[in-house]
Image (spheres, grey):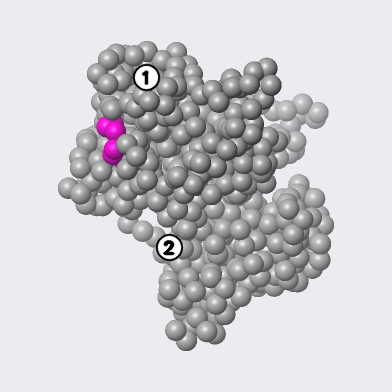
């Protein structure tokens, strides 16, 4: 079995000195110093757009520093590509996974490596090593499974196995918990602790303070591309980190009581199949009123994703009905639903909510480019479209060099703001918001919450699907708990404790949970 580096070599330290990185119109990093040692977790903390990922992409060879120096075990190194970094023993787990969906786990791990039996493949050898790594680090994964069949958490395990298979001594994890459930986060942290015990050095890129406090030994904070400071995690408080990150105090928002209006979204007996030909929705009944947020709580994989897709027209309904303001939209195409007053913030923003290589302006007008106010006969009125784009970018505080910038170059929080700008500017009657703050920072989360509450006050019926129970309890008027494709209980926000909702998420009936 061939790998890309010597398994006997283990990096002891990586140091980045005075790193400067510029892009057209953007100073992404300015004289940043950062280091990580074997056997520690060094967190890189900051809001979206602070320069965290850019800094680590330079360490991984995706970008080249304009100024500064990278040292491996005290020796200066220059990486011209990720292959150079991998050869030196550096691995990176990207926020958006670098896997081929149509290949198996084994094929993805072996991709790009020489076979030990060249010109024949040695996938059996690779699969055996994957099993060894999976058992050793607590990474449960089926080597023969196709990537498209795996959950997000399982795909992340494949990425970690890829790095371990290549004998990476220093591993960069870019927002590794952004797409995980609380249970998956606990499993990941168990794996990371084993990796540290084995002598790996880990860079943990995040903006989630409680996770940084729980897993890291040291933390470095970036803001606007500059280094604010480095400290030992045990020597600083959560509030101290918040001030370093955003330069001010951040106060949580909460939904204030409102008089709900008439039912705007009515779901009756909804059933649907999942990707693996098993029934994922098994008779969902739910009413959502205008001026109300109904939150969906549940462990990932209990039908939340399928519910959002059915409501937005992206998944076929096998039985039941969906009505919007009394009109049956069960089998209505997506575009027609949007024109009838429905908006959708998808769970996978880069897959279902945006086109990576399209510009900010093009993504804002994916649905409205043919609207009468933006056309001259059969021709597009680009001047009006540009003016509208600048107006929305300003109104929703989207940070972008210009409106022609490809959306893939924006931070996760700014991409999410742009999607919200597109959807909410249509003044929807009903909003389906699936994981609206997943992977975004404190400031962007505060902003998104405010926008959702404003939309609620405007009379929109909002279905909030979130795996962040604190978010669900903060924003929702009522909470519906899903388990194995069914709603097993609906409670008012202040009617049940976190523990009781947690019991319902584990399949305990509402009556029994409320009695405990």
Residue appearing at x 48%, y 83% in the figure? 514
Question: Which segment did they paint magenta?
Answer: 36-41
Q: CA distance from mark 1 to mark 2?
A: 37 Å
Residue 425: give x, y in percent of width and height.
60, 47
Give percent across and percent down for residue 497. Answer: 42, 75
Q: Within 10 Å of the Cα at label 1, are there few (<14), some (14-19), or many (20+) other Cα atoms?
A: many
The reply to whether residue 153 is visible in this rendering is: yes
Q: Please give the residue where the numbered disc 1 appears in the rendered image.
A: 21
Left or right, residue 459 beside residue 367: left
Q: Residue at x 34, y 27 (%)?
A: 10
Which quarter shows the C terminus?
A: bottom left
Identify which residue is drawn at 37% across, 16% down. 65
Closer to the camera, 98 or 344?
98
Does residue 152 sit above or below 302 in this rendering? above
Quadrant in which residue 279 is drawn: bottom right
Q: Residues within 10 Å of mark 2 (few under 14, many from 20)?
A: few
The answer to which image quadrant residue 382 occupies is: top right
In the displayed structure, would residue 380 be above or below residue 319? above
Q: Is 411 on the left or on the right of 303, as rendered?
A: left
Q: Which mark is residue 470?
A: 2
* Residue 37 falls within the magenta-colored stretch: yes
Residue 287 image point, x, y percent: 66, 72
Numbered disc 2: secondary structure: helix
Q: Is residue 448 magenta?
A: no
Mark 1 near mark 2, Cβ–Cβ under 8 Å? no
């Amino acid at each position: 079995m061939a790998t890309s580096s010597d398994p006997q070599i283990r990096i002891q330290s990586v140091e980045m000195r005075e790193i400067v990185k510029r892009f057209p119109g953007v100073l992404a990093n300015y004289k940043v110093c950062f280091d990580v040692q074997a056997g520690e977790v060094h967190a890189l903390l900051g809001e979206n757009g602070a320069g965290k990922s850019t800094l680590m992409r330079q360490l991984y060879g995706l970008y080249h520093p304009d100024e500064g120096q990278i040292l491996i075990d005290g020796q200066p190194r220059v990486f011209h590509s990720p292959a150079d970094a991998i050869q030196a023993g550096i691995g990176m787990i990207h926020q958006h996974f670098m896997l081929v969906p149509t290949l198996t786990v084994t094929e993805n791990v072996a991709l790009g490596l020489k076979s030990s039996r060249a010109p024949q493949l040695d996938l059996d050898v690779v699969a055996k090593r994957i099993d060894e790594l999976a058992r050793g680090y607590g990474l449960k994964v089926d080597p023969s499974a196709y990537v498209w069949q795996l959950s997000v958490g399982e795909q992340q395990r494949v990425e970690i196995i890829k790095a371990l298979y290549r004998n990476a001594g220093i591993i960069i994890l870019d927002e590794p918990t952004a797409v995980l459930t609380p249970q998956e986060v606990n499993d990941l942290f168990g794996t990371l602790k084993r990796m540290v015990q084995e002598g790996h050095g880990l860079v943990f890129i995040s903006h989630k303070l409680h996770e940084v406090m729980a897993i890291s030994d040291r933390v470095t904070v970036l803001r606007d591309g500059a280094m604010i400071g480095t400290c030992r995690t045990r020597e600083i408080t959560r509030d101290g980190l918040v001030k370093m990150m955003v330069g001010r105090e951040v106060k949580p928002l909460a939904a204030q009581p409102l008089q709900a209006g008439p039912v705007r979204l009515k779901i009756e007996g909804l059933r649907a199949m999942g990707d693996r030909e098993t029934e994922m929705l098994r008779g969902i009944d739910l009413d959502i009123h205008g001026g109300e947020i109904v939150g969906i709580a549940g462990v990932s994989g209990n039908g939340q994703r399928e519910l959002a897709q059915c409501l937005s027209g992206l998944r076929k309904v096998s039985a039941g009905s969906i009505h919007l303001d009394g009109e049956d939209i069960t089998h209505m195409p997506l575009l027609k639903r949007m024109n009838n007053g429905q908006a959708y913030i998808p769970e996978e923003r880069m897959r279902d909510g945006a086109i990576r290589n399209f510009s900010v302006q093009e993504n804002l007008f994916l649905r409205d480019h043919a609207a009468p106010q933006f056309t001259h006969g059969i021709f597009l009125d680009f001047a009006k479209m540009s003016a509208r784009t600048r107006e929305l970018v300003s109104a929703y505080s989207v940070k972008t060099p210009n409106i022609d910038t490809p959306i893939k170059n924006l931070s996760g929080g700014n991409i999410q703001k742009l999607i919200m700008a597109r959807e909410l500017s249509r003044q929807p009657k009903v909003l389906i918001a699936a994981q609206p703050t997943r992977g975004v920072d404190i400031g962007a989360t505060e902003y998104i919450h405010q926008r959702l509450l404003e939309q609620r006050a405007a009379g929109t019926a909002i279905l909030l699907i979130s795996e962040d129970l604190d978010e669900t309890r903060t924003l929702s008027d009522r909470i519906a708990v899903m388990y194995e494709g069914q709603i097993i209980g609906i409670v008012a926000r202040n009617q049940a404790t976190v523990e009781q909702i947690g019991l319902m998420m584990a399949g305990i009936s509402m009556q029994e949970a409320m009695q405990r």
